[in-house]
Amino acid sequence: MSIKKEILTGLLLDEETTLSLGELSRACTVHAEWIIELVDEGILEPAGEDVTHWRFSGPSLQRARTAMRLQQDLEINLAGAALVLDLLEEIETLRTRLQVLDQE
């Protein structure tokens, strides 16, 4: 019996961590142009006035990776991915509110 060993690597980012366009594209292993498409579609919202000064929050990495999986696994276009991400975010917000109400 052979045992398959996998090495997992990860990056922990909090709300206050920011990434440049280059750092985010490297973390997602995609071209910067794809990240720019995510911004154009409203999936990501960077701080900064132009592309060279964009800064992305830590949660942007998870959002970009989820959009990538939606495209690759389910063949959803970016507009559909934006909708799915917004709905997932809304579900999480509602779950949090429900938990608060259940504790009262």
Image: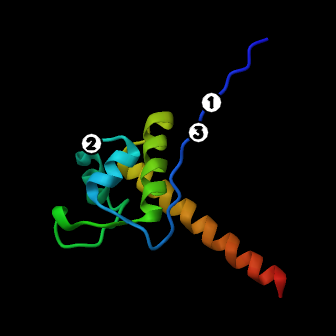
Q: Say which amino acid is labelled 2.
A: His
For the C terminus, the quadrant is bottom right
Going 82% across and 80% down the picture, which residue do you hit? 102
Q: Are marks 3 and 1 in contact (CB under 8 Å)?
A: yes
Q: Say which amino acid is labelled 1.
A: Glu
Q: Which residue is mark 1?
A: 6
Q: Position of residue 72 (x, y in %)?
A: 45, 35
Q: Say which amino acid is labelled 3.
A: Leu
Going 66% across and 26% down the picture, which residue do you hit? 5
For the N terminus, the quadrant is top right
Q: Residues within 10 Å of mark 2 (few under 14, many from 20)?
A: few
- As displayed, is residue 101 above or below residue 36? below
Distance from label 1 to label 2 (Cα)? 26 Å
Of marks 3 and 2, the one in the foreground: 3
Of marks 1 and 2, the one in the foreground: 1
- As displayed, is residue 55 above or below residue 70? below
Q: Which residue is mark 2?
A: 31
Disc on the earlier residue, 1 or 2: 1
Helix or strand or loop: what does disc 2 sit on? loop
